[in-house]
Amino acid sequence: MGDFTVLIISSIFINNIILAQYLGACPFVGTSKKMETAVGMAGAVVFVLTMAGMITWIINTYFLVQLNIEFLRTIAFIMVIASLVQFVEMFLKKSIPALYAGLGIFLPLITTNCAVMGVCLLNVQDELTFLQAIITSAAYAVGFGVALVLFAGVRERINLGRVPSPLRDTSIGLVTAGMLAMAFIGFRGMV
Amino acid sequence: MLASILFTLGLGGACGIVLSFASKVFYVYEDPRIAQVENLLAGANCGGCGYPGCSGAAEAIVAGKAPPSVCILVGPENVAAIAEITGGEAGTAEALKSYNECMGGSRATDRFIYQGVNKCSAVASLYGGKRDCTIGCLGYGDCVRACKFNALAIGAEGYPVVDYERCVGCGACQAVCPKTIIEVSPMSARLMHLNREDDALAPCQQTCPAEIDIPRYIDHIRKGEYEAAVNTIRERNPLLLTCGRVCPHPCETMCRRAIEDEPVSINQLKRFVADIEMNSGKRYPIPCASDTGKRVAIIGGGPAGLSAAYFLRRLGHHPTIFEAMPKLGGMIRYGIPEYRLPKEVLDWEIQGILNLGIDHHVNVEMGFDFDLGSLIGAGFDAVFFGVGAWNDYNLNIPGEDLKGCYTGINFLARVGKNEPIDIGKRVAVVGGGNTAIDCARTLVRMGLEKVYLVYRRTRKEMPANDVEIVAADHEGIEFIFLAAPNRVLEDEDGRAKGLEYLRMELGEPDASGRRRPVPVEGSETVLEVDTIISAIGQNPNLSFKQPGTRLDQLEITRWNTFEVNPETCQTNVPYIFAAGDSQTGPATVVEAIGGARRAARAMDQFLRGKPFIGEPRALLSQKKIGESIFERVPGIKQTKRAEMPELPVQERITCFDEVDLVINEANAMKESNRCLNCCRLCYDPDISIDTKRPAA
Ligand SMILES: Cc1cc2nc3c(=O)[nH]c(=O)nc-3n(C[C@H](O)[C@H](O)[C@H](O)COP(=O)(O)OP(=O)(O)OC[C@H]3O[C@@H](n4cnc5c(N)ncnc54)[C@H](O)[C@@H]3O)c2cc1C
Ligand code: SF4
Ligand code: SF4
């Protein structure tokens, strides 16, 4: 049990996918202008990343490793993730329209989210078990969500302030992201 | 090698098969328009519209939650194309634009030295700003910084200027302005806005019963933007050609310029732009909100009914007008004579309203041809009554039903319909209101020997418009004041041969403040006339409200008018609304229009099933905003107001040609420059006003 706590804490805070590993920076900047959008995106990422972590683990362990074709990993994962996202979108639209209304619109954007790919590859690299893989994926996703929502909150405030024109919008956003990342370094001492 | 190729193919195939099946199994019908709209959007997924991605925006547009212009990257052609797909006729869906109330001017003096943060929000929190003018723009440009589209700049006068080419109507500027100077409101919100105590309202706009934004349209005229002026008027008044001719313009009596000089000829300017549109040969487009599918029956096609239909249509509903007479227009067609409002002009104006897609039926009278039950059976969601006041009061004197005696409305309506009437040579018209004067002036034009106007009080008490009285005087009508008809004398053929009246004296003032006339004993005098027209007032004819019908429980006042809530014009039956003469008693065209707009506002909320949102700070036109009413206006250079050109008296009394003519463009320009732009321009009592205007 203790193992899992460490795994979760380190995935959310210490190895935060955005602020420590610099993956998924594009949606991080793109969907963080409004709190509402940020929360929607965070929800969608948690959903997809957990699913993707699960499926890619299965593909990797039962196909790639068995057939000795690990070099196809990247290509295989891309295909699986893209199809998965499409599938999930269609499934939600038909079966759980309420959830689709909340997340659906963000799903296609996730196809291009490198954090998802990154987490799947990391899971393989770290040679995690199936359960560990699921939990890490979910925890990474939560970390992504936390960072995104925090950042959106900060940006909403910054927009009200007087920012010198060369620094407005994305530029000040990146500076802020840098500072957030430094703040996250502080979590290193936690474990 | 083989394994890897097979695996890749297998995985690809598996993904493909799963997805194909999924798209079959999980197929959900999606409005094809969403995909069409999405194709027209920029496809950048930038989120600039506030929706997550272009497909989100497309969905919102098709659902009617976002205007076709949400996407910040598409050009006007694509916006029009999108509007076409979503059903809003291309070109009619109005984009949101930023409006700016304050027009700057040399700034008012400062009350204190301010050294804080250079932000409007900060300045506003310190005693509402350092300037003397508490309503105006603060000029620190929070809106300019909020605008992501570079559509705003602080102009030379120190207030924000909007670049309409760039403005997308995102509303960021409105959100940050601490003073409600800059406003981004959709058309329907502007149509529904009632004058409020805390609006920056010029005295004239506070007085206009239709609440027209007078300084704004005068400003448009000054800049030569005639179409914009017409559109500004049309937001509040669909009958601008009519009002430009017959309105008694109460706004001019409150004009601030009148304190030191003559008032601005507000109504002449309205007529000037209205005529420009009519003579231009084309109609300026009138945008309408997207369809709601709700239907409203409008009973009566007078100014009240036409305006209610117009506003409801612009708000997206479907009104149908039912009119008892052969043509639409009500009193402005059958009461107001040709020489004041030519029928050709009226027809053009009414056609423009009907062109919005309003159905109408003429020659059908409520109570005879249909009743409330049949309207409800036909599926109408609400009913509006604008049946006017067509019942003439009787004189209640012996002999008034002899041959040669008529009542005013009956007489005018018959002239309006070109029916032959048996009129003698010498006529007495009884009454002192507009109806009486119109009867008298009509009779003059019919070539009579002598026309008397008999009124029981004096000229000062006459309720008719002053210009009308003056015109009647010029046309040779003889006024007999302080005279109360006593009886009609009869000749051997049973025809009237004279009107006997008693002379009166003015006594104590009555409840209305007018001095009550009292008869002088033994002062009977006979006026030798062969025709008598009594026009002493009207009340509504509500004979369709009969016991045992659905209208039984409808409340009626003791003046035989509809009892309504003054803010909503709603009667005690929730789906029935009423305005115009049938609700106020005989009044004016603008009042009917103002009432119809209030009714349309409430009906819109009723039809959409929304809880009624009142306007607690609504400014009823009798009330004025204290600080906007001045005692003195120093620094005004006296300039004469534009004279209204008229047909010469000799020419006009022989025909029914229009008497009042329109002012020319140069005079309109001069006149619009006389407007002080009250409550828009920073006011500084120490600086001469004529030097304070921003360069036109
Ligand atoms: C002679 C005269 C001169 C005037 N001059 C001026 C002026 O200079 N300036 C000014 O501002 N105002 C003037 N007015 C007042 C102005 O005309 C009215 O205030 C205005 O027309 C009221 O509009 P309304 O729609 O309420 O009623 P109306 O114009 O009276 O229209 C009511 C309509 O309802 C129809 N109707 C009635 N009963 C039924 C029924 N049972 N079923 C179906 N339809 C029905 C009538 O046929 C009529 O068309 C004048 C009025 C008169 C009589
Ligand atoms: S902030 Fe938006 S609404 Fe205001 S001027 Fe700029 S584009 Fe127009
Ligand atoms: S000067 Fe202009 S704004 Fe002022 S009251 Fe007169 S018409 Fe209205």
Image (tube, coloured by chain):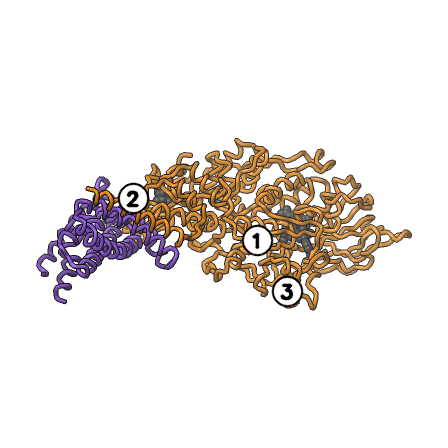
Chain colours: A purple, B orange
Q: Amino acid at mark 1?
A: Ala
**SS for dot 1:** helix
x, y percentage for residue B406? 78, 51
Left or right, residue B567 beside residue B530:
left
Q: Gap between marks 2 and 1, in whole Å?
A: 41 Å
Looking at the picture, how far across and down is residue A118, in whole percent?
19, 49
What residue sits 76% from the left and 45% below the top? B451
Q: Which residue is mark 3?
A: B556
- Camera sees residue A40: yes
Q: Position of residue A90 (x, y in %)?
A: 36, 53
Location of residue A4 by image quarter? bottom left
Q: Residue furthest top?
A: B666
Hey, what amino acid is under mark 2?
Arg
Q: Is label 2 within 8 A of ligand 2 (CB to nearest ligand atom)?
A: no
**Residue where numbered disc 2 is placed:** B145
Label 3, label 2: how far apart the Cα atoms are: 56 Å
Residue B463 picture location, percent across and down: 64, 52
Residue neighbourhood size for the residue with mark 1, other residues' Cα within 10 Å, grouped as few (<14), some (14–19), many (≥20): many
Q: Assess mark 1: CB under 8 A from ligand 1?
A: yes
Comparing B29 with B144, the one in front is: B29
Q: Nearer the viewer, residue B393 or B545?
A: B545
> In this rendering, would B570 be left or right of A166?
right
Instruction: Say the numbered circle drawn on residue B596.
Output: 1
Question: On the picture, is B123 further left or further right than A70?
Answer: right
